[in-house]
Amino acid sequence: MTESTKKPMPARLLDGKAIALQIRQEIALEVETLIRDRGIVPCLAAILVGDDPASQVYVRNKEIACEKAGIQSRLFRMPASTTTSELLALLRQLNDDQKIHGILVQLPLPSQIHEREILDAVHPTKDVDAFAPENVGLISQGRPRYLPCTPHGVAQLLGRCGIETVGKEVVVVGRSDIVGKPLVSMFLQRTGPLGSSNANATVTCCHSQSKDLSSITRRADILIVAIGKANFVTADMVRPGAVVIDVGINRLNDGIVGDVDFDQVSQVASAITPVPGGIGPLTIAMLLRNTLTAAQASANG
Ligand code: GUN
């Protein structure tokens, strides 16, 4: 084959499902130890308001994952017409319940509910999503109590696949409170969940108002995309050889796709996460990790 007809090497697939399984096995062992040594069974309370189909699937998957790891889960279903004060009353009850270690309020909430007020009402020690202001502040100061599940999943995936971030150009596309902002905050730190090689990046964050997006994304050694727009990132936006992490989960008529056009980008990237089977399974694994951390902290507190 001549140089001009040589096909580009397809990217290495970063198998989030396999890594999530490995993490879940590690957690299950720690859960066993906590139960055996301290008699504490970690317990996660999940609150689901209304009947959004995607949220039902997420919550169900979380329940199954908890059970497999030996973590108890309690699901609180509330009707779509629930008010902010009704939800606050349930949170007070769960905050006070010593047997519940983690509380998760599934988002999005129906529009009549004041989301910020609800998230602020979860006790910070039970805030396994790491959405509470105190926990966000601790992350930005480099002394996290909990790491938010999806960004933590990204860091674990990179670290466990042997992809270091030290001194690399990490470009995050998306500035959500759940994914984009905490990713920026985490990769800026001197140390990450897997040590110093899992942090210390030069981080850039782009968003809907960024000018000439491609010129920024093409700088990335590691490009992380979390904007919720199907197949948004195309091959021309990616520097050949970059690592591409796709956090998007977009439901189309013919299936689930990410924010990255996988067919195109896998021809230029050196490594890429698939959707499904990339970051999604890690998000759940890290939720289990936070629930276990909460239960371990309750044993020591
Ligand atoms: N809805 C979509 N992602 C999330 C998440 O990470 N946590 C919660 N609680 N709800 C979500």
Image (spheres, grey):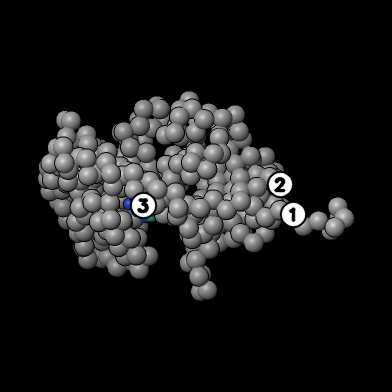
Label 3: which residue? Answer: 284
Instruction: Give x and y (percent) for residue 79.
Output: 22, 66
The one nearer the camera, 247 or 71, is: 71
The one nearer the camera, 128 or 41, is: 41
Point 27% across, 65% down: residue: 50
Label 2: which residue? Answer: 240
Q: CA distance from mark 1 to mark 3?
A: 34 Å
- Tell me which numbered mark, 3 or 2, is placed earlier along the sequence: 2
Name the kind of residue labelled 3 in the image: Ile
Q: CA distance from mark 3 to mark 2?
A: 31 Å
Q: Is residue 251 left or right of residue 219?
A: left
Report crowding for label 2: few under 14, some 14 to 19, many 20 or more residues within 10 A (C-alpha).
some
Instruction: Give x and y (percent) for residue 272.
Output: 58, 51
* Label 3–label 2 contact, CB within 8 A: no
Instruction: Give x and y (percent) for residue 213.
Output: 65, 47
Q: Looking at the rendering, in which quadrant would you find the N terminus?
A: bottom right
- Tell me which numbered mark, 2 or 1, is placed earlier along the sequence: 1
